[in-house]
Image: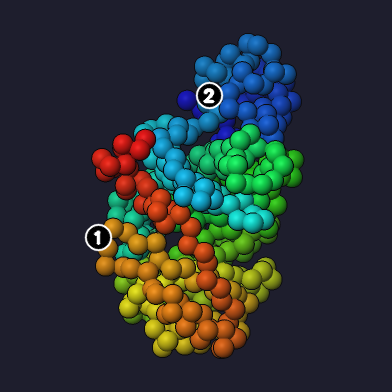
Amino acid sequence: MLTLLDFSRTELRALMQEWGQPGFRGDQIYDWLHKELAASPEEMTNLPKELRARLAAETQCNPLQLIVQIDSRDRLTRKALFRLTDGATIEVVLMLYNSRRTVCISTQVGCGMGCTFCATAQGGLMRNLSAGEIIAQVHWFERYLRQEGPAELHVQRPTRLTNVVVMGMGEPLANYQALIKALRAIADPDGFTLSARSLTVSTVGLVPMIDRLSGEPLPIRLAVSLHASSNRLRNQLVPINKRYPLESLLAACQRYVQKTGRRITFEYALMRGINDSGQQAGQLADLLVGLLCHVNLIPLNPIPNSPFQPSSDEDTKMFQQVLERAGVAATVRLRRGIEINAGCGQLRQAAQQPDLIQMI
Ligand code: SF4
């Protein structure tokens, strides 16, 4: 069955022509999908009845089926687990801040990068998501905000997502084509209309893909998950470092900044006794000083039975101060949804356990 969200506007026009329809029907379908967030052809009231019937029989608008969603106690973080058409499952997280409504989306089922502290890595990579499966995650929460949204969100309805971060399950740059196609649709000024500057793509450091991304006309933001300041430690935490060590990764980051003029964010998950000493903070500052960048320090979301635990508040503060004294901008990111397994891959893993099934 075809997933309509996999098609660009041009591709939908071509599909309609293939079906013996005028090309503008493709524009109408695109507008229904990306502007009105139609979840079924039945809603597309300006299409002929027979065309709607054929669309209903041969295509799907929404490839996601909700399995479970859980709110944090303050109801400002909502995590959802979805089943895809082939039965695979993915996670999506909505985070509400004072002025931002951010959705964190996935690009792969599982992940092949093998980061040792990450729940998603434990099952390996199953497959890439299609562009439509990526877009559908954004649409799901956009629909929720427009139509319903939590009462705690004291804003007038309908309201909208303000940011998309591609930091969920998977390495986004390992699924490059689908990622870019999805981001183009999300940032389409004649479609979903979220500003490309509100989109952030996170990578563990696929150097050739960072270079490729720097040539894209979309002015999206780049975040690089660093997590270590020496190759020795990074080889253990983020195994892709053996292929693209820190020197080569940071050189690619330099090229990216030179070419785009945009600041890079470095993500650094602070793990107690592993990467959070003052000496490691100094080493990190030496690596980054002079580069147009910002460091996000994130106390790790602990995985049950894992040796990796979050750093203490004192060590987190100390780490931040060392960076700032050296002239490297650093903030501590609020840890969201810790009681709802909000770290990447954790809900999916927990869903295989019986106690969570009771909550569904
Ligand atoms: S941290 Fe990201 S890149 Fe690393 S294994 Fe987990 S999902 Fe993949």
Residue under the point 31% across and 36% down: 358
Question: Residue 206: image x %, image y %?
Answer: 47, 64
In the picture, the quarter occupied by the C terminus is: top left
Asked whether the viewer can see residue 85, the reply is: yes
Q: Amino acid at mark 2?
A: Thr
User: Going by the image, does 54 lie left or right of 162?
Assistant: left
Residue under the point 44% across and 43% down: 70
Q: CA distance from mark 1 to mark 2?
A: 43 Å
Residue situated in front as seen by the camera: 97 or 222: 97
Tell me which image quadrant ligand 1 sits in: bottom left
Residue situated in front as seen by the camera: 231 or 285: 285
Q: Nearer the viewer, mark 1 or mark 2?
A: 1
Question: Residue 4: image x %, image y %?
Answer: 57, 30
**Mark number for residue 305?**
1
Give the residue pinned by disc 2: 59
Mark 1 CB near ligand 1 (8 Å cut): no
Residue under the point 57% across and 15% down: 54
Residue under the point 67% across and 29% down: 32
Mark 2 CB near ligand 1 (8 Å cut): no
User: Going by the image, does 75 lie left or right of 269?
Assistant: right
Asked whether the viewer can see residue 245, the reply is: no
Q: Residues within 10 Å of mark 2 (few under 14, many from 20)?
A: some
Which of the two discs, 1 and 2, labels the residue nearer the N terminus?
A: 2
Quick one: which residue is furthest to the top in this view? 50
Q: Amino acid at mark 1?
A: Asn
Question: Residue 90: image x %, image y %?
Answer: 42, 43
Question: Residue 61: image x %, image y %?
Answer: 56, 28
Q: Secondary structure at mark 2?
A: strand
